[in-house]
Image: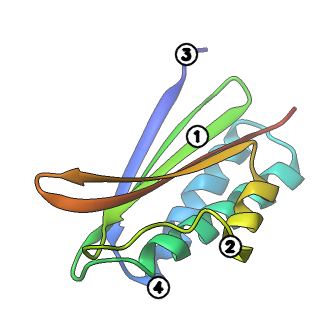
């Protein structure tokens, strides 16, 4: 089966992170991933959103795109961030992300002249 994609955008508010987390878990359940993998995905998505929200420009939106198939899910989560902010790729939060996922990377770019922070993570059953 070819990879499929689901994308959702919510206001960049901590109260809406459970929506993104639950979509990720639902996709993993539909893929029949192991319960441990589903739990790891939920935690990793929650951690990624938390890292991004701490750097959010206000007001902004948080966009998550999930690409799934072949036993893996890649989550690409982004938002407009404050000027001059960067994603730490060390420390406790980053350690949690690397422990829960197959791969994780943080990116900083610009979209239409607005600084953007992205966390991309991949998880799946071995």
* Residue 61 placement: quadrant: bottom left
Q: Secondary structure at mark 2?
A: helix
Q: Secondary structure at mark 1?
A: strand
Q: Secondary structure at mark 3?
A: loop
Badge 3 is on which residue? Answer: 2
Q: Position of residue 14 (x, y in %)?
A: 47, 83
Q: Do the residues under discs 3 and 1 have CB atoms within 8 angstroms?
A: no
Mark 3 or 1: in front is 1
Q: Earlier in the sequence, mark 1 or mark 2?
A: 1
* Residue 36 placement: quadrant: bottom right
Q: Residue at x 36, y 73 (%)?
A: 85
In the depicted structure, whether residue 38 falls above or below residue 3 = below
What crowding class fits label 3: few (fewer than 14 Cα within 10 Å), some (14-19), or many (20 or more)?
A: few
Q: Position of residue 55 (x, y in %)?
A: 39, 77
User: Quick check: 80 left or right of 3?
Assistant: left
Q: CA distance from mark 2 to mark 3?
A: 32 Å
Badge 4 is on which residue? Answer: 15
What crowding class fits label 2: few (fewer than 14 Cα within 10 Å), some (14-19), or many (20 or more)?
A: some
Badge 1 is on which residue? Answer: 74
Badge 2 is on which residue? Answer: 93
Q: Residue at x 79, y 60 (%)?
A: 39
Q: Position of residue 96 (x, y in %)?
A: 76, 67
């Amino acid at each position: 089966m070819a990879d499929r994609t689901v994308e959702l955008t919510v206001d960049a508010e901590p109260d809406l992170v459970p929506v993104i987390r639950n979509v990720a878990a639902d996709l993993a359940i539909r893929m029949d991933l192991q319960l441990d993998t589903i739990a790891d995905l939920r935690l990793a998505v929650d951690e990624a959103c938390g890292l991004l929200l701490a750097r959010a420009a206000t007001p902004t939106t948080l966009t998550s795109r999930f690409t799934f198939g072949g036993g893996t899910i890649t989550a690409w989560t982004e938002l407009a961030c404050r000027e001059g902010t960067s994603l730490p790729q060390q420390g406790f939060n980053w350690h949690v992300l690397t422990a829960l996922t197959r791969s994780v990377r943080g990116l900083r770019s610009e979209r239409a002249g607005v600084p953007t922070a992205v966390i991309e993570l991949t998880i799946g059953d071995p």
